[in-house]
Amino acid sequence: MSNIWTDRWNERYSNEAYAYGLEPNAFLKQELEKLSPSKILFPAEGEGRNALFAASLGWEVSAFDIAQEGKNKAMKLAQERGLKIDYQVGNLSELNYTPAQFDAIALIYAHFPAVIKSELHKELSNLLKPGGTVIFEAFSKSHLNYIAQNEKVGGPKELDMLFSIEEIQNNFSNYEIIVLEEKEIELQEGIYHNGIGSVIRFVGRKK
């Protein structure tokens, strides 16, 4: 991924405050508590709030991000909480994950550049065991209307970086759909996710 992207996220995570707060995402929390702890991967994990929540439940947690500053904040939090996660920095293609390594993958506001996002979903799916679970929440294409009303709700302003139900169906076509919906929700996550927005939520089980 380009240096522009890396620099953008390093800058966001370099502040002392946690950009999206310290508490786990509400949808992730709800869905993760339904599963038995095993091996889970958090792509684009940022400052670690979600990965560390999973670790607190007993999951064996792996995470990655392009921003070293994100890892620094996550590991500081891990030390404070007495938790252990494996956190790598780099693009997925550079990392040493193996096919069918994980029992679950959590994609929480993992917005990638439009040219790679669908392919990246398929590459991540290869890392999941048959019967494994994907938990996904990210902004929908309708979300641009909400940003126009309130920029504090956050999220990408490029339509192609946002998601549709059809896109998720295509990217995860070999999955049993447990949840797939577009929903208006209220976010209160740190500095950058505050207000009413539109999201796609997906829980799927790999066939």
Image (spheres, rainbow, N blue to C red):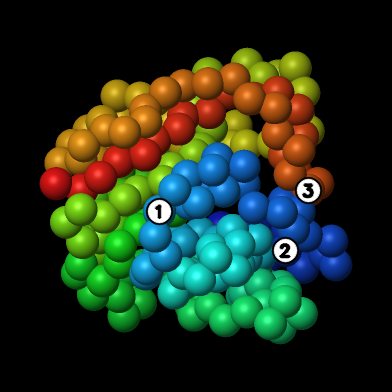
Write the residue at 25% across / 64% down.
Answer: 127
Reading the chain from its start, which is encountered first: label 2 or label 3? Answer: 2
Q: Is residue 15 left or right of residue 101?
A: right
Disc 1 marks which amino acid? Leu
| Residue tagged 1 | 35
Give the mark toward the camera: 1 or 3: 1
Give the mark toward the camera: 2 or 1: 1
Residue closest to the eye, 167 or 78: 78
Write the residue at 55% across / 65% down.
Answer: 57
Q: Secondary structure at mark 3?
A: loop
Question: Across the whole image, how many numbered discs are drawn on residues?
Answer: 3
Q: Which mark is residue 13?
A: 2
Residue 89, placed above or below residue 207: below
Q: CA distance from mark 1 to mark 3?
A: 26 Å
Write the residue at 53% across / 78% down.
Answer: 85
| Residue tagged 3 | 190
Q: Secondary structure at mark 2?
A: helix
Residue closest to the eye, 152 or 116: 152
Query: Callout 3 environment at 10 Å: few (<14), some (14 to 19), or many (20+)?
Result: some
Residue 71, placed above or below residue 135: below
Reading the chain from its start, which is encountered first: label 2 or label 1? Answer: 2
